[in-house]
Image (cartoon, grey):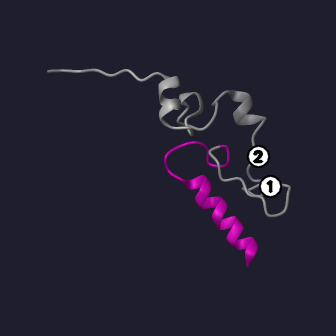
Amino acid sequence: MLARRIVAPPDLEAMDANLVGGDLGGGSNAWHRQLIFRPLFPYFRHRMPIEGLYLCSSYAHPGAGVHGMCGYNAAHVALRDLG
């Protein structure tokens, strides 16, 4: 017997609060989100203008994906700042 299950974005969001709007990438890939309203590499490099604040979300370089590099890179910057 074959079966099929369709899960719409509101259903995904109900299952996992991290999937706002069912968005697996953590945000829009619209051009203005990628080019304008995003910390620009290499100017921030995960370090925000507020001391001790680091950006490790999918909006940081290298961008959304399942690789975890945003957090990895931010952790390296934070550890380097701690000495």
Residue 71 located within the stretch drawn in magenta: yes
- Which residue has dot 1 on it? 48
Q: Is residue 48 above or below residue 21?
A: below
Q: Nearer the viewer, residue 64 or 40?
A: 64
User: Label 2 to label 1, Cα distance in Å?
Assistant: 11 Å
Q: Residue at x 74, y 75 (%)?
A: 82
Residue 18 in the image: state x and y as whole percent: 56, 40
Q: Residue 66 at x, y = what percent? A: 49, 46
* Nearer to us: label 2 or label 1: 1
| Contact (Cβ within 8 Å) of mark 2 with mark 1 | no
Give the secondary structure at mark 1. loop
Residue segment shown in magenta: 59-83
Image quadrant in which the C terminus is located? bottom right
**What amino acid is labelled 2 in the image?**
Leu
Q: Position of residue 8 (x, y in %)?
A: 46, 21
Q: Earlier in the sequence, mark 2 or mark 1?
A: 2
State the image coordinates of residue 9 (x, y, percent, origin top left): 51, 24
The residue singled out by tag 2 in the image is 40
Residue count near mark 2 (Cα–Cα under 10 Å), binned few <14, some 14–19, many ≥20? some
